[in-house]
Image (cartoon, grey):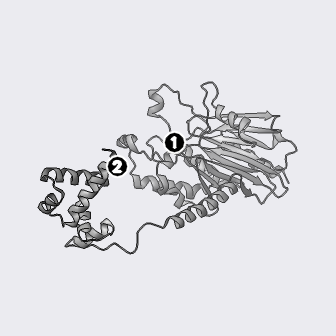
């Protein structure tokens, strides 16, 4: 007997069983089968066609309805389906995501080189504070307070921070809070004070800041005339005499060398973009270098600010000697310079940089 013949015998047996209202004795007598044979054929047919008891009941009633509907009709408790789904319709979801991407692309393209208009042709300065870590027990508050006072009292000198404003420990690093003498709430009060005192044109979020995620309190402390970006930003300062100065500021640049603390800055200057200044913090050391890049037809400064955190347990454990200077880097920009080498000058001592700026602004008409 072929497979098709077997199936037709099963189907005939099953249909007869249903027509007889599932009466086993009547079906056995009509087909001349033993009860065990009838049971075997019914079971096999159900298995091949994925038929359950509800559908059996429906077939015996002569109905051809969907399983769920049949189940509801036979059930004593009926729960109607909800008319309105909670999920956003798929087409609306796709349209919303498309609109969001277009808006994000416009935003990212616009800030690739963030334009900053400078309303004077006189020299200006930017004090780049290295990682402040204001809530750390070993933050150098003596130097930090001195530097903030210099920024506030020096005309034409503007503040900027390269990130890591607090320790903001998370995860396994939270154990380090046992050494803290400052509460979490007071940490944010200190950051708010720092921003108010410095009135920065730019703050960069370092890895410690970014551990707060989208709930980072710093972005709510900033004012409209201030820039706050995650990890890095690129500024283009535009002066009235149409001189343009490009600055690539980052919490850190990719690349590391034990022989050159400015290795990452050099890589970015060579391969990523053409700027007049590449500056970072993060590694708690400082260095300065001015170079000419003929392939980019520019002279640029490579810089790293040390920051204000001292007696670092991590540095001590791994044998890194601590530097004593370069907490902040002061860059003086002269838009009236006649050549690229004189366009910018960098100082590792903010006090000296501020004095130079005062002299230069007085000298240049």
Does the image show residue 228? yes
Q: Mark 1 points at which residue?
A: 140
How many circles with numbers are drawn on the protein?
2
Residue 132 image offset from top left, x and y in percent: 53, 45
Q: Looking at the image, can residue 216 be seen?
A: no
Q: In which quarter of the image is residue 155?
A: bottom right
Q: Quadrant of residue 185?
A: bottom left
Give x and y (percent) for residue 323.
Answer: 57, 31
Q: Is residue 147 above or below residue 295?
A: below
In the picture, the disc for residue 65 is none
Tell me the distance, in whole angstroms, between the alpha carbons under discs 1 and 2.
Answer: 90 Å
- Mark 1 residue crowding within 10 angstroms, few (<14) / some (14–19) / many (20+): some
Give the quadrant of the C terminus: bottom right
- The residue pinned by badge 2 equals 4
**Does residue 206 appear left or right of residue 84 in this picture?**
right
At horizontal 57% and vertical 60% (from top left) the residue drawn is: 222
Q: Where is residue 128 in the image (x, y as percent from the top left)?
A: 64, 46
**Above or below, 84 relative to 134:** below
Q: Residues within 10 Å of mark 2 (few under 14, many from 20)?
A: few
SS class of the residue under badge 1?
loop
Residue farthest to the right? 338
Q: Which of marks 1 and 2 is in front?
A: 2
Q: Is 144 displayed left or right of 158 in the figure?
A: left
């Amino acid at each position: 007997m072929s497979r098709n013949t077997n199936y037709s015998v099963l189907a005939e047996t099953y249909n007869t069983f249903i027509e007889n209202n599932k009466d086993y004795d009547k079906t056995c007598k009509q087909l001349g089968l033993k009860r065990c044979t009838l049971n075997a054929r019914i079971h096999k047919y159900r298995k091949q066609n994925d038929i359950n008891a509800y559908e059996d009941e429906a077939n015996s009633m002569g109905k051809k309805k969907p399983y769920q509907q049949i189940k509801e009709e036979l059930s004593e408790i009926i729960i109607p389906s909800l008319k309105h789904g909670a999920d956003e319709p798929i087409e609306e979801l796709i349209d919303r995501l498309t609109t969001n991407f277009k808006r994000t692309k416009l935003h990212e393209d616009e800030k690739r080189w963030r334009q900053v208009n400078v309303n004077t042709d006189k020299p200006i300065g930017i004090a780049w504070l290295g990682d402040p870590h204001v809530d750390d027990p070993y933050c150098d508050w003596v130097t930090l307070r001195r530097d903030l006072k210099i920024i506030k009292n020096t005309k034409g000198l503007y503040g900027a921070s390269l990130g890591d404003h607090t320790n903001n420990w998370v995860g396994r690093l939270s154990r380090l809070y046992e050494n803290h003498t400052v509460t979490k709430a007071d940490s944010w009060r200190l950051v708010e004070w720092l921003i108010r005192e410095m009135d920065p044109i730019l703050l960069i979020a370092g890895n410690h800041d970014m551990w707060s995620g989208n709930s980072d309190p710093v972005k709510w402390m900033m004012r409209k005339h201030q820039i706050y970006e995650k990890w890095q930003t690129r500024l283009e300062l535009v002066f009235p005499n149409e001189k343009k100065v490009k600055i690539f500021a980052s919490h850190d640049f990719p690349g590391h060398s034990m022989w050159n603390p400015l290795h990452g800055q050099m890589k970015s200057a060579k391969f990523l973009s053409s700027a007049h200044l590449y500056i970072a913090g993060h590694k708690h050391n400082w260095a300065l270098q001015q170079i000419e890049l003929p392939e980019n037809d520019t002279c640029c400064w490579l810089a790293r600010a040390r920051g204000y955190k001292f007696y670092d347990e991590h540095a001590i454990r791994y044998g890194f000697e601590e530097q004593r200077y370069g907490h902040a880097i002061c860059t003086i920009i002269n838009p009236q310079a006649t050549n690229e080498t004189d366009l910018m000058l960098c100082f590792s001592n903010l006090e000296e940089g501020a004095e130079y700026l005062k002299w230069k602004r007085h000298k240049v008409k």
